[in-house]
Amino acid sequence: MVLNEIKDFLKSKISKHRNYAIPQLWIENHKKIFNDIVEEKEGKIFVDPYEFFYSAISFILDKSEKKDYSKSLGILNGENNPNWFNKSVVYGSLPRMTAAYNHKGFGTFEETDILGFKEAGTFLKMIPLLLHLKSFNVNTLYMLPVSKSSNLFKKGSIGSPYAVKNPLVLDESYHDPLLEDFNVETEFKALVEAAHILGIRVILDFIPRTASRDSDIIREHPDWFYWIKIDDLATYKPPRIEELPFKIPDEKDLDIIYRNSEVRNHLKKFVDSPDKIDPVKWEKVKNMDGNILVNIIREFGIVTPPGFSDWVNDNQPTWDDVTFLRLYLDNPIAAKKFVPETQKPYVLFDVIKASKFPGSIPNLELWNYLSDIIPSYQKRFGIDGARIDMGHALPSKLQEMIISKAKDNDPSFVFIAEELEMNNDEKSKNDGYHAILGNTWYSVARREEFYKLVEETSINMKLPFLASAETPDTPRIAAREFGNKLKYLGPFLLYFLPNGVPYINSGQELGEIQPMNLGLDNTIWGKTVLPPDDEFYAKLAFFDHYVLHWNTYDKELYSFLKNLMNEREKYKDFIFNGKFRYVYFNYQDGFLANYSYWIEEKGILIIANLDFSWKREFEVFVDKTKGKEINILNAKIWDKKGEIPIISPSNIIKLTLNPGDFCILKINVD
Amino acid sequence: MVLNEIKDFLKSKISKHRNYAIPQLWIENHKKIFNDIVEEKEGKIFVDPYEFFYSAISFILDKSEKKDYSKSLGILNGENNPNWFNKSVVYGSLPRMTAAYNHKGFGTFEETDILGFKEAGTFLKMIPLLLHLKSFNVNTLYMLPVSKSSNLFKKGSIGSPYAVKNPLVLDESYHDPLLEDFNVETEFKALVEAAHILGIRVILDFIPRTASRDSDIIREHPDWFYWIKIDDLATYKPPRIEELPFKIPDEKDLDIIYRNSEVRNHLKKFVDSPDKIDPVKWEKVKNMDGNILVNIIREFGIVTPPGFSDWVNDNQPTWDDVTFLRLYLDNPIAAKKFVPETQKPYVLFDVIKASKFPGSIPNLELWNYLSDIIPSYQKRFGIDGARIDMGHALPSKLQEMIISKAKDNDPSFVFIAEELEMNNDEKSKNDGYHAILGNTWYSVARREEFYKLVEETSINMKLPFLASAETPDTPRIAAREFGNKLKYLGPFLLYFLPNGVPYINSGQELGEIQPMNLGLDNTIWGKTVLPPDDEFYAKLAFFDHYVLHWNTYDKELYSFLKNLMNEREKYKDFIFNGKFRYVYFNYQDGFLANYSYWIEEKGILIIANLDFSWKREFEVFVDKTKGKEINILNAKIWDKKGEIPIISPSNIIKLTLNPGDFCILKINVD
C-alpha cells in the first residue's frame, strides 16, 4: 500500500518542531491518538505536521487487514450489486475547501505559505479528516471534481473544479509539499486506501459534456471542439429568439430558431478546427510552449467559444470557463434541413441538447475517450462510484457506454444522476443510475413541500435520493429563513426518510452559513451572508479559496448532528428492514410531520412540528400507528436535549412540540 | 525624449486590427484625435492599441517645445520656490486602478488577458488618460506609490502599494506588454514627459518609515530590520497595557509600559539580525534563489515582525504586510533605564514613535539611504513633488534631511505632509512642508464641521491643504449619507476655498461609490456598497485589482465637475488675488455657507444651502458683502443647471436655494 510508504516517509521527517496549526476539531474525536503530540499556544493548537499525519495514518493502518485497499470496497467484499449505496451516509466535499486551514497560525490564508505549508486542502490532509467523518458515521465520501482544472476565464481567484482541463489527471494543487517527491496520484491513492480501511467508500464527480476552454484534449483532438473567430468573441452570446418564450426547444421550434437573424449571424462566427485550417502550421502550434489556447489564438486567430444554457432565452450569462465537446460529427438530424452543407460545426440550443437532438454520426473516438475516464479511475484508485454531471444532456447511447463500461469492471459501482426532479426517479433508473440527487434541499426550506416530501414523495421513490438539507450548489441550511430551527429540523426529518441517503455537505456540521456556489435556489445576495470583516466574506468555494470556520463553529449543532447520526446508526435496521407506517394523532393540520418504522412490536416514530410560530400539543395513537393494539413495555423520547423515558406509557401518548421542534418516540426498544 | 522612441515603436506596430476595447470616456474629450481609429461593436469601442497610443502620444508631442521634459516643470520654468502648488488642481491616482480596463472586451477582468493585453493599469495607459485629466483642468498628477511592492502577507489578491519591497525600483506590473522590450523605468519616464508637455506636474508618494516584510534592502542591510523567532510569530502582537488607556505614550508612561509582563515577554521574542547570528551562513543565504525572507526563515528560523500602531491599546490588528526600519542603533533615550544592556533590537510604542522618543545613535547609513530616494526620482524622472507617509513619526533630523536634499536639487520641489489635523498647519510649515492633506473629506460629510471649515478654518490656514471631498483612504463622496447631494455640493464649496488645492480622487469624477481602502472614517461595511453582482463587489483597490465604472458612470456628475472646474479656471484670479469677504444675508442660521472674492467692484459669491431637508429663501446684501455700496452693472447666477443673468440687479438680491443646492453669484464679471 502506498499509505505505508507515506507513513514511513513521514516518520523519517518527525522533528517535534510544533509549528503547524490545526483546528481543535481535527483531533477532537481522537484525543488518544493525538493528545501527546499537540502543543497549545494562546488558544491555538500546534503540531509537528509530520508527526500529526504519521499518527493519523498509523492509527488507520492499524485497522487494516491483509487486503488490497486500492480496489473498490465492493470488489473487496465480493459484492455484485451497488445496493450498498442505499445504506450509505454521504459526506460531500470539495477537498481544497474541506481540508483548507491557515497552518502557519498567523496572518491570513495563503494557498502555500511562507513556512512552505500548503494551506489549501490536499489529499494528505483529507486523511486525518476521515476520522472527523467517522464521528458522524459517514461511510461514503463524495468528492467534487478533483481532476486538473483550468485557470482560464475564471470567475474568482482560482478556477472552478467544474472547468476540467484534463479529466484523466488529478489537479496538481492537491499535492502536499510536506510529501516532497510524492506525487498527487500517489497521494490520492493513499487517501482512497485510508478511506477503504475505515470502511468509507469514495465517489467522484465527472463532467463528460464540457471541457475547459483550454482543455489538454485540444492538443490531440482539436476537431473535438467548436471554434469561432477571436474577433467575434466579444459579441458571442446565445442568440435571442424573440418569437419564443423561455424554454427547452422542441423539434417544431427549430424552424423559427434557424430563420432567426441572430441565429444566422451566430452561425457565421464558427470556423474549422485549426488542424483543418492549416495542418502544417497546426503541427507546429500544438507543440509550442505555453497555454495551448493562447497559442492558437495568436497563431490562428480562433478560439473555443464559451458554453451557454440549452434553454432558449435563458438570462444566464455565458459559461465562460467551459466549452462544449463535439459529440456528433454532423448536425442534429432534426436541424439538417435548416443548415447549409457548408456550415462549419456550430453550437446551438439543439446541438448541446444532444439527448433530444442527436446527430447521425457519433464522434465515436470521443465517446470512447469519455467512457474510458471512469474505468481509468477504477483501475488506478479503486473508486466506488461516480456522479455524472449533466448526464441528461448526453446522447443516451453515450450515457449507456459510460455506465456499462464501469459496471463491467465493478458490478458494485454506483452511478448517481445529476437529476433534481424527484419524479424522474424511474427515468434515471431506466438509464442505469442507482440514485439521484433530488431536491430535498429545496423542499426542506418550504413547509408544504417538506411535508409532502416526508409524507408522500420519499416512500414512493423508485431510486434512492440524497437526503440533503443543503448541497454545494444551494444555500446553507443555517442561512435559510428560520435557519436556526431548520439546521436541526431539516437533518432530523431527512436523515431517517425511506429511500433517503443522508447527505452532509462539508461545513454543514459546523453551522457554516456561506454557500459554496449560487447555482440553485439562491440570489446574488446569497454570497453576502458572512459579516464583512470575515476573511472569506463574499467568497464562494467554487471560485475562491475558502476555509471553513473550524474555530468558531456551531458547537451545539455539531454535537446534535453527531448524536443524530448515532441514533440513526442504532436504529438503521428499522429504516432498512422495518415496516413503514404513518403516525396517527388526535388531529392533523399539515404541520405535524411524521413517519415510523416497525419491527414487530418495536417501533421508532419520527415526529416534528413544522410550524415555526406556534407549538403543538397532541396525542400520538400508538396502536393506530402500528395498526393494532400493542403491549407497551417501555417508551422513550429522544430530542435535541437528550433522551427521557415516559412514565407508564399507554397506547395514547401526549406530546408537546414547540415551534420547529421534533422528537423520536421509541416504543419497546432498548 | 523617450516619448519619441515609444511613439516610433508604436507606429511600427500599427496593423489596424481593432481588438482592444477602451471606454468611451478615454476618447470622449478628444474626438478629433481618435474619431477615425475607433470601431464600435454592439456598443463597445475597439481600437488598434498601437494606433490608439500612437495617436495620443503624437497629439501630446505636437504640443512640445524644445525642452528637456525629464526635468521638473519648476526647473524648466526657472522657478525657485514651490508656490506653484498653491495654484494647482490635483488628480490623485493609483495607476494600476485608474488605467485598468477589460481590454479584451469579453468575460471578466484579468491582470493580463488571453490576448496578451495588460488589463491592470500601466504607465503607458496613463498617457492618454492625461487628456482625460486635462478636461478637468488638472495640472498636478499625484500618484500613490508606484515602487516595487510585495506580495507577501497581502490582504487581498495583490499586494498593497504601501508594502514597499524596493523604494528605488518601479513596480514591474506597470510595464505594458504592448511595449515589448521597453522597461517600466522608460515607460514611467515617458509618462512624466507627457505630463510635463501638457503642463501637468507629477507628485509621488514615499514611505520612509516602513518596508515590506521581505524588503530587497534586507539582502545588503539585514541589520536595518528587527528580527524575531519564527515560532513566536503566531503570537506576536502589540502588548496590551491594562494600566493605560488608548493613547500615544508619554515619557511618564514608559515606567508602566516596561514593567508590564506582556511587554517583558514581548521583548524576549527579538533576536539579532541573521548576519550577526552567523555571518558565514548569512553570506550563503543572502545569495540564495527565491524570496529572501523565506530563505531566512528556513535557514535561521527568524523573521521580520509585522508593524503595529504607535498608540498603546490600539485595537487595530498588526500591519502584516510591513515591518519597521531600525532608525536608531540604540534604544530610545527615555527608555534606556528600563531595558537591560543585553536586550536585542526591539519594536515597541516608543521605538516606533521616533519623533517623540529618539535614540542617541542615528542609523546614519539608513538615513542617507532614505533621504537619497527622492533625489534618485528627481534625477531619473524629474518628478515635481512628494507626499511623505507618516513623516510625523520620523526623527525630525531625518525628516529635515529628506526635505533638504530634495530642495537642494530643485527649489520648486513640493513636499506634502500626511498631516490630517488642519491646526497642525504651522507645525508642518516649520518642518519644511508646503502643504498638508488636511481633513476636508471629514468635514464635508458633517454639516457643522463643513460650515466651520468654509467660514473659519480655511481662510486662516498657514499652509495650503488638499480640498478633497474624498481620498484613497476615505469613503467615496457619492457613497456618503446624502451622497447624491454631497457629490455636487462638496466639490463646489471645497474647490473655491482660500488656501484649498482642489483634489479629485480618481473615480470621483465618475461617481464611483466603492472606496479604495477603509483607512479613514469608514467601517468594514464600507466595502459592501456595490451591488453584489458587480464584478468588483467588496474589492478594495489597495488590495485587489479594481476597474472604475467607466461604462456606467454618472454622466450628470461628470459634466458638472467639468463645468465646475472650468468656472474655477475662469475665476482663479479672484481666488488667488482677490479680497476674501464673507457674504452678508438678511439672516444667517448656520446653514448658508458662503464666501466671496473681490477685485475692485467685481465679485464672485459662493453660496450654498447646507440643509438637506429644507430650502432657504434669503436676500444677499451685495453692498455689505463688498463693504460698500457698489454700482452693479450686471449680475449672474451659475448653478448645476447653467448660468442665468439677473434682470435689473440691485444691492439686495433675492435667492432661493433648495436643500443641498448652491450657486455662484457673479457681480460685474463678464
Image (cartoon, coloured by chain):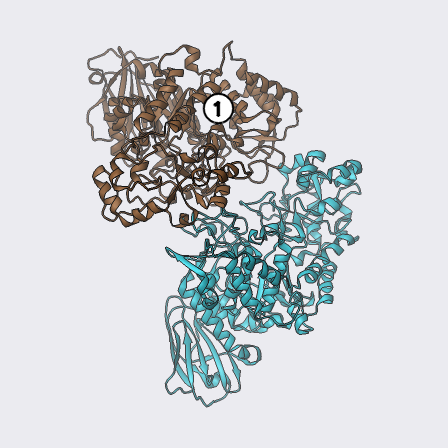
Chain colours: A cyan, B brown
Position of residue B384 in the picture relative to residue A380 (left or right): left
Position of residue B497 in the picture relative to residue B288 (left or right): left
Q: Is residue B481 above or below residue A27?
A: above
Protein chain holding label 1: B
Residue drawn at x 61%, y 63% is A4
Residue B129, given in percent of the width and then of the height, sits at: 50, 25
Residue A579, given in percent of the width and then of the height, sits at: 55, 81
Q: Is residue A526 above or below residue B334?
A: below
The kind of residue tagged 1 is: His
What residue is pinned by disc 1? B132
- In which quadrant will I find the C terminus of chain B? top left
Q: Nearer the viewer, residue B548 or B7?
A: B7
Position of residue B605 in the picture relative to residue B183 (left or right): left
Snapshot quadrant of residue B161: top left
Residue B202, given in percent of the width and then of the height, sits at: 44, 21
Q: Nearer the viewer, residue A566 or B284?
A: B284
Q: Is residue B426 above or below residue A484?
A: above
Snapshot quadrant of residue B607: top left
Residue drawn at x 41%, y 47% is B233
